[in-house]
Image (tube, grey):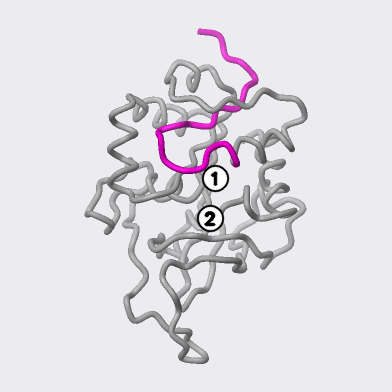
Amino acid sequence: MPASRSIAVIDYGMGNLRSVAKAIEHVAAGLPVVVTADPAIVARAERVVFPGQGAMPDCMRELEARGLRSAVLEAARNKPFLGICIGEQMLFTRSEEGQAAGLGVFPGTVERFPAAHRDRLSGTRLKVPHMGWNRVAQTQAHPLWAGIADHSRFYFVHSYCVQAPDSPLCAGSTDYGLRFTSAVAADNIFAVQFHPEKSARDGLQLLHNFVGWRP
């Protein structure tokens, strides 16, 4: 099965995939971008984007039901791979949300923000879900940060997060009453908790960097 230069956006029925695809098309310099639930198309693609919104148990169930689990794991092993939001969380071993098992690409548990969640300086109670713009501290150099200033602001919508800011996987961290991992990187994988497709210029720059990334 010959590979193509396409970028596959994996469709397992969860999230606004069209906005992700449109943002990538904007920076893809004419490369085809396809939203697909077909494992064969994912296998042929040059690079893969794994987005998603919703509850982790539902996302994992839909991924299995559509026969996409193996395609995602294979892509995570050998292609430039970008996870977004739940697409980052699903790469880990387990989530507290429904005690759902993830894909286990990375060790670790996705945890919920505490119920009595407060700003550490002001004591103000923080809303959960964490929704809106927040800064990302770049905790390691990476090609996908090229052209993006440290502590730039990105758009978040989530109640669960990876709380491992000291892990060698951590490529970016964010403070929301506690410091959590907002980007992870290892080999051919880069994954973020925020939504680059909703994050204006810096989000588009990150997607542009991914399109040209040669891990």
Residue 32 within the segment the image draws in magenta = no
What residue range appears in magenta?
1-19
Residue 100 in the image, given as x and y percentages of width and height = 25, 49
Decide: few, some or many residues near mark 2? Use Cα within 10 Å; few <14, some 14-19, many ≥20.
Answer: many
Q: Give residue 200's quadrant in the image.
A: bottom right
Q: Amino acid at mark 2?
A: Ala
Where is the C terminus found, in terms of image quarters? top right
Q: Give residue 98's quadrant in the image.
A: bottom left
Residue at the spot of label 2: 183
Decide: few, some or many residues near mark 1? Use Cα within 10 Å; few <14, some 14-19, many ≥20.
Answer: many
Residue 14 within the segment the image draws in magenta = yes
Residue 214 in the image, given as x and y percentages of width and height = 66, 33
Instruction: Classify residue 7 as left or right of residue 58.
Output: right
Residue 146 in the image, given as x and y percentages of width and height = 73, 50
Label disc, if present, on residue 190 of the rendered structure: 1
Of residue 100 and residue 181, the one placed in the foreground of this image is: 100
Q: Secondary structure at mark 1?
A: strand
Residue 42 in the image, given as x and y percentages of width and height = 49, 22
Tell me: residue 74, above or below residue 185: above
Q: Residue at x 63, y 52 (%)?
A: 198
Of residue 5 and residue 188, the one placed in the foreground of this image is: 5
Distance from label 1 to label 2 (Cα)? Answer: 7 Å
Tell me: residue 164, above or below residue 71: below
Q: Give residue 64's quadrant in the image.
A: top left
Instruction: Classify residue 133 as left or right of residue 176.
Output: right
Instruction: Classify residue 89 as left or right of residue 200.
Output: left
Q: Sequence order check: which comes first, mark 1 or mark 2?
A: 2
Q: Are marks 1 and 2 in contact (CB under 8 Å)?
A: yes
Q: Secondary structure at mark 2?
A: strand
Q: Residue at x 37, y 41 (%)?
A: 105
Q: Amino acid at mark 1?
A: Phe
